[in-house]
Image (tube, rainbow, N blue to C red):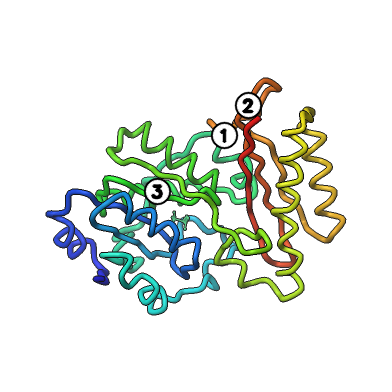
Amino acid sequence: MQLIHTVAELRARLASEKAVAFVPTMGNLHEGHIELVRLARSRGSCVVVSIFVNPLQFGPNEDFDKYPRTLEADCEKLQGLADVVFAPAVTDMYPEQQTLFVEPPPIASELCGEFRPGHFRGVATVVLKLFNQVQPQVAVFGKKDYQQLAIIRSMVTQFNLPILIVGAETTRAADGLALSSRNQYLSAEERTEAAFLSQILSGMGETLKGGAVGYVAREREAAAALAKRGWQVEYVSVRKQADLGVPGEAERRLVILVAARLGKTRLIDNIEVCL
Ligand code: PAF
């Protein structure tokens, strides 16, 4: 496995590769990331993992400064799994002040976008830059960031990028909590409570499969159940898998998405429901 820091070195290393499978990350790798890398390995002959904490996708009061940076440990985890780890410096990623951006679609202002203005513009911009730098044939993203995945898929389609986007299932702890680098911000007590987030989604999923309609009422019930246990709920929302639009009653392929804070930690999760 080769650790590369500059775009020039990356281009030289990948020049003769024909089947690059790419996993973009912000590092602090856990088993969820490793699953993405394994999936990438099954999709390409050269696996590239990028590690870059992207300032453009963090709001002024978010955790950019305290986001865990653990490059050495990450590289150890990737030994034997990735061929290249690309860890550019901020000055390499943004050689001049970024004044051109990918303007994401209107859905980027809903759900997480409502609470993190500008977040998906920062994500789409850095992912486009990473795609230009790595020039992969395949790129793997986790379904845990469902809205991000949907926006990246649209970007690839609308900008005619020759990249196959693969969505990977969410990796969960034994109690159901979706793995996330931010889980480490939780206190022991909060970590126990955090499992409730996936439980409420599974329960709601079963209710919908049982024929319940009136999604707004179901969303309110779930939000109230979370709030009662001390969560600060940003949203619980039933959407269409296809485009994250609000579903009509005839829609069969749904996804339930949630974002809520436990203490100072913001957690997101989702579950796909096929009726
Ligand atoms: O999902 C992430 O870790 C980030 O949003 C990504 C895709 C690496 C862009 O910075």
| Residue that label 2 marks | 252
For marks 2 and 1 on the same chain, the one whose residue lies earlier in the sequence: 1
How far across and how far down the image is residue 239, in percent? 64, 34
| Residue that label 3 marks | 125
Q: Amino acid at mark 3?
A: Thr
Q: Cα distance, mark 3 to mark 1? A: 23 Å
How far across and how far down the image is residue 110, in percent? 62, 39
Going 31% across and 41% down the picture, which residue do you hit?
A: 163
Q: Cα distance, mark 2 to mark 1? A: 9 Å
Determine which of the numbered discs, if any, sits on residue 241 in the image: 1
Q: Amino acid at mark 2?
A: Arg
Going 27% across and 72% down the picture, which residue do you hit?
A: 3
Q: Cα distance, mark 2 to mark 3? A: 32 Å
How far across and how far down the image is residue 169, in percent? 51, 49
For marks 3 and 1 on the same chain, the one whose residue lies earlier in the sequence: 3
Which mark's residue is nearer the viewer, 3 or 1?
Answer: 1
For marks 2 and 3 on the same chain, the one whose residue lies earlier in the sequence: 3
Horizontal arrangement in the rendering, residue 259 relative to residue 161 (left or right): right
Q: Quadrant of ligand 1?
A: bottom left
Q: Secondary structure beneath disc 3?
A: helix
Q: Secondary structure beneath disc 2?
A: loop
Q: Quadrant of residue 203?
A: top right
Going 68% across and 63% down the picture, which residue do you hit?
A: 175
The one nearer the camera, 255 or 174, is 174
Could you classify mark 3 by the number of other residues whose Cα lies within 10 Å: few (under 14), some (14-19), or many (20 or more)?
A: many
Q: Quadrant of the C terminus?
A: top right
